[in-house]
Image: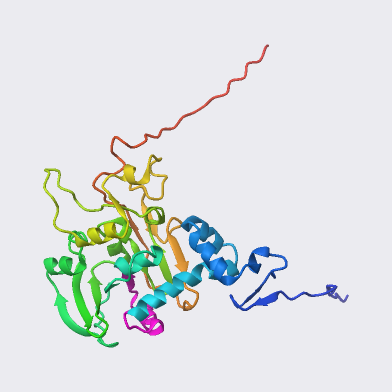
Amino acid sequence: MRIRRLVQRYPYREELEWCSFCNKRHTSDKDAPILRLPLDLSLFIVSLLPFSDRRSLHDSCLHMEKLVATPVTTRVRNTLRTFGLDPAPFLESMQYYGAVIGGMAALRIFAEEVPMPRVLEVYDDNDASDDRGNGYRLVDTLLHTYEKCTVLGYRHYGYGDNIVKIFRMVNTTLDREILFIQCRVPPIALITEAPTTALMNFITSNDAVCLYPELTEARKGLFTIVIPEDGSSTFDIPVFDRLVGHGFTMFENATRAIGRHLCPMNPSCPALSRAYPDLLMYSVHFTDAGSYGSRIPSITWNLNVPSSCGSSERIQTGVYLYFTVKWTRS
């Protein structure tokens, strides 16, 4: 017995049109009217959308993914060029060491009204040597806690002094500084110990990530520092003055910042245990990201705020059981 497989023949084969913008084949603008919009207008519309809508648009198709990612990629590249850095090799070195960029430079990617900072903060948990290229020279190696907090502007940054040392690099021609911050913990773990949620953003070699997008989009920040109860003030924290000057409002109480909510259902609720990566953050993958995997470890954390959602303003939640009883006659 001989068995022959029948060859299935199709009446015709249609090739999808090639898109020069995203370099992919997809539905043409005849079938998708949204693709008929001029590129400048499409990018402007995306800039007006909230982060949640951008995320949905980003995940809808390859064309929209690049449409959302292009402005973010451009801002990251322009930031590095402002500091006299070649984006491609610098991000490649970040990929190799598992480093991230934090501070005001990372916040500016998600809040465009924040001006370009003078200092670039690079976090790394490896004992990597400082890079003295690109016109930068080493001027300080900071080892003492007071010196670290002074140069960062964060008085209460990190629990148990999780910063080993800071290399302070200066480019006098550009009037810019780069702080290479060596951590005892993974870089993202140190980012989550920032004095406010407004600074819990970072840039990896392939992505720009905002850990608390709802608060950042509303230009709000939760304090994550200890505020004295005896009426005395904390040490001077210059970064808070800069954030307030850029239009951010700082909150001690989580309920006032988030509003009345169900704990721990709200993504910004301090009672919610968070992890990186998760679906609650807002992450944008660069359009020219490398194909290598990430060397950044996953972490979990809880916000340590002065007045958590365990206060009297919290909406108490409970379990309610409803029974339906049906009577029948015998």
Residue 119: quarter of image: bottom left
Is residue 46 at least partly visible in the picture?
A: yes
Q: Residue 136 at what x, y percent from top left?
A: 24, 85
- Could you tell me residue 156's position as x and y percent? 19, 59
Q: Quadrant of the N terminus?
A: bottom right
Q: From this viewpoint, which residue is outermost toward the top?
A: 330
How many marks on residues? 0
Coloring applied to the structure: rainbow
Give the image location of residue 323, x and y in percent: 54, 25
Q: Where is residue 65? Give x, y as percent.
A: 55, 67
| Front residue of 185 and 6 | 185
Residues shaded magenta: 83-102
Instruction: Identify which residue, 122 or 51, lies in the foreground.
Output: 51
71 lies left or right of 185: right
Where residue 92 sits, quadrant-wise, is: bottom left
Q: Tell me which residue sits at (39%, 61%) in the image.
A: 210
Relative horizontal placement of residue 141, taking residue 78 as reference (left or right): left
Report if residue 124 is visible in the image. Answer: no
Residue at 37% of width from left, 34% of height from top?
316
Q: Is residue 175 left or right of residue 112?
A: left
Task: Identify the residue at horizontal 49%, vertical 56% (top origin).
Answer: 52
Magenta-span inclusion, residue 98: yes
Quarter containing the C terminus? top right
Residue 13 figure quarter: bottom right
Residue 313: say if magenta: no
Q: Is residue 215 above or below residue 6?
A: above
